[in-house]
Amino acid sequence: MKKKRIIAILLSLVLVISGFYVLQRLLVPKYQTGIVEGSMIEEYYRDESKHEVLFIGDCEVYENFSTITLWEKYGITSYIRGSAQQLTWQSYYLLEDTLKYEKPKVVVFNVLALKYNEPQSEAYNRMSIDGMKWSKSKIDNINASMMEDEKFIDYVFPILRYHSRWSELTEDDFEHIFTKDLVTHNGYYMRVDVKPQSEFPDPMLLADYTLGDKAMDYLQRMADLCKQEGIELVLIKAPTEYPHWYDEWDQQVVDFAKENDLEYINYIPLQDEIGLDMSKDTYDAGLHLNTSGAEKMSDYFGQWLIDNYDLTDYRNDEEYVAIWQEKVDFYNEMKEHQYYELETYGELRSYGANAIDNKDEE
């Protein structure tokens, strides 16, 4: 009798825990359509191939560099661990996390994030952190990133944060409760539409142009970690001109790179040399490059990478060719579908593999 009671209690616990898990999976955002940036960080763990080049940073990496172009043009294997408004300390902990799985030859960090010295919003924090696997790096990332009104326990049990999403649930939430479609191409976010660059507002005058201590401290940690691991760290400023990148900020990065024996390239004055035409190569009036622009940028940057670092051309490796051919096919299929949406509707309506899967239903 006692044994049956124990079994009944254990079964009840299993049912309660299972129900709690399923409910939590249902209520957390899926980021499969619309704001897909929340899916980017976790997609990395699904890619079992190795990468010689790792990009970390904000939208100025995941929207401006095409990993597929780097492969097709130069045989470079790369991944972009990017997320929306990824802060410098978040990039550091994502780098730390990535090194548990592989050791790239080159790490590329976009410096625009240095303008932020404090956490900016819970929503952006979530898109950079929730997708990480649990580890000390994730714990440290949460502690470094939380806003004053955020609680650590809400990251451990997201249901505490999202319990009120009942009224917002969509078909996506049920369809992707346990599995998600890929929305990026090794971290690259595709947009083929065009919206020409317009005039940007005059830059604001700042009371202090000094980059913050916290941001610069984590940049130093990044440089030290790469040096310790024998990895080349490259600092870049993407060629897009807004938000404004001040000359005073640029000089501080130039000085930092010199002090740490790092490469730093500001691509803003190199738009013409890259071949960018901002009347055609941006989808949001100049804030980010579209696919046409990202492919040009990647072709240019890929040539610089192979000229300066001992990277392998894996296009002669049958195992890598097979892996990357699937990626190329997915890239071309999504590109074709986005052009289809533009031609049919005059706008893009959806992003990610689910958009491709639903094409026959339209």
Image (tube, rainbow, N blue to C red):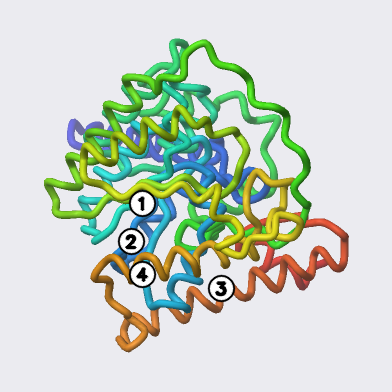
- From the viewer's side, name the closer residue of 42 and 116: 116
Residue at image mark 3: 330
Q: Earlier in the sequence, mark 4 or mark 2?
A: 2
Q: Specify whether 155 is left or right of 262.
A: right
Residue at image mark 2: 53
Q: Of helix, strand and loop, which one carries label 2? A: strand
- Residue 20 appears in the figure: no
In the rendered view, would you say 348 is above or below 308? above
Residue 135 picture quarter: top left
Residue at image mark 1: 108
Q: Earlier in the sequence, mark 1 or mark 4?
A: 4
The residues tagged by marks 4 and 2 sit, at their Cα atoms, a distance apart of: 6 Å
Q: Which dot, 1 or 4, sits closer to the camera?
A: 1
Q: Which dot, 3 or 2, sits closer to the camera?
A: 2
Circles 4 and 2, Cβ within 8 Å, touching? The answer is yes
Residue at image mark 4: 77
